[in-house]
Image (spheres, rainbow, N blue to C red):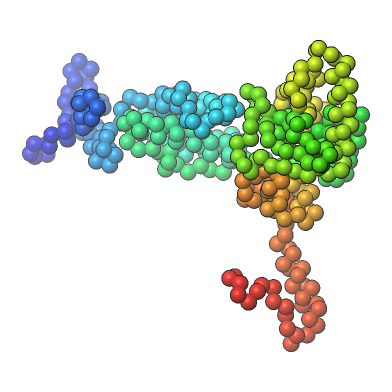
Amino acid sequence: MSGRRARGDGSVFYDEQRGVWTAVIELPRDPDTGRRTRRKASAPTKTAALALLDDMRAEKRKAGTVGKRDVTVGAVVADCLAHPPASWRSPVTVQVYTDLAGHITAALGKARLATLTPSRVERFLAAMAADGYSTSTIVRARGLLRAAIRRAERDGQVGRNVADLAEAPAGTRQRARWFDMGQVHDLLAAAKDDPWWYANCHVAIMLGLRPGELLGLRWEDVDLRAGEVRVRHSLKASGLADLKTSQSRRTLALPAAVAAALREHKRAQRAERLRLGEAWREHGLVFPGADGAPCSRSRAEHGFGKLCERAGLGPGWTRYACRHTFASQLSHGGIDIEVIADAMGHSNSNVTRTVYRHGLADRISAAASTFDQIMSASGTRDQEIPVLVSADATV
């Protein structure tokens, strides 16, 4: 190499104290402090150090900075958890990402951020898929890693975000379960002598509320005279919380069977409140715990599993089966997907199709049967076939 390098273009020297070759490159001065910053990287040979210097030069040209060579993936993920984004409003969300951080740290925690590659991130995600994790969990793991590296990128600790370049593989997709109408009758029959569960199952199956919305439902939001229920809250780990979106906040008409079950449950709850006296902890909830306080989601899940076993439905059922049943039965009853999406509190029907597609009736076959009817009615090939779209329609 001939000629003198430009100022700030970096150099290589032998560090006698450490016994290694060191590449060093100078970064622009900090605009706030005026301090000069250098990045260093070490290698056992001069040739390897020159290669490191070339990498740092390329990173500087592309990103305008050079990431710290000693920052690890574990450090930036820990920093992201310590200073979570504002969008992580729910304690449940924080816990989910905390659990995912454990997977990332175990696999990549000691890796230096400066040398992390997209292919190594993809190998980590592929290992999660091989271990049986769902697609959504794998996507969330990549999202957490991307958010952590983005923060490091912002602070000049790394020149690029390799998680942006990594593709997330498809994971294990758990098939949803829902009840057929025979199972619905068996479930309600098993709950008949327990007004709490009898009303809870009616509301869950015939209104499609989420498990948290059920436990967060208040009597002031139930109008038995008008025959409607206003869904406005959900029970979280931190307590009762307002629903976040306008689509989730909805008002639903009460089927007669649901209204009757709620009336009976309200009478039984009033009697239980009188029996317990001062031991009753009033929260105004439709489905509280035995003492009137909010019922934990785990207790409700456990109780529902026991109810399904008493009904002869077998093990493995969760309360979400009721919500899937709501979507499935409405779809097979001919209700439009947009109406189902509104009733379920989804932001749009794409969510309904994606999450509940196994239970939704397949309408594509209707086109075939329609043409069968048309051709059968026409009798001869010369007869005009009815037009299925308007003449000015865009097909």
Residue lying farthest bottom? Answer: 382
Q: Decide if residue 36 is in sight here.
A: yes
Image point (92%, 29%), residue name: 193
Pick the front one: 332 or 242: 242
Quadrant where the image shows the C terminus: bottom right
Pick the front one: 261 or 75: 261
Above/below status of 388 relative to 344: below
| Picture coordinates of residue 273, whole percent (x, y) | 84, 19
Image point (79%, 73%), residue name: 373
| Picture coordinates of residue 216, whole percent (x, y) | 71, 30
| Picture coordinates of residue 369, whole percent (x, y) | 77, 68
Q: Quadrant of residue 208?
A: top right
| Picture coordinates of residue 282, whole percent (x, y) | 76, 20
Q: Give left or right: position of 77 versus 185.
A: left
Image point (32%, 36%), residue name: 159
Pick the front one: 336 or 166: 336
Q: Quadrant of residue 382?
A: bottom right
Q: Quadrant of residue 17?
A: top left
Pick the front one: 304 or 289: 289
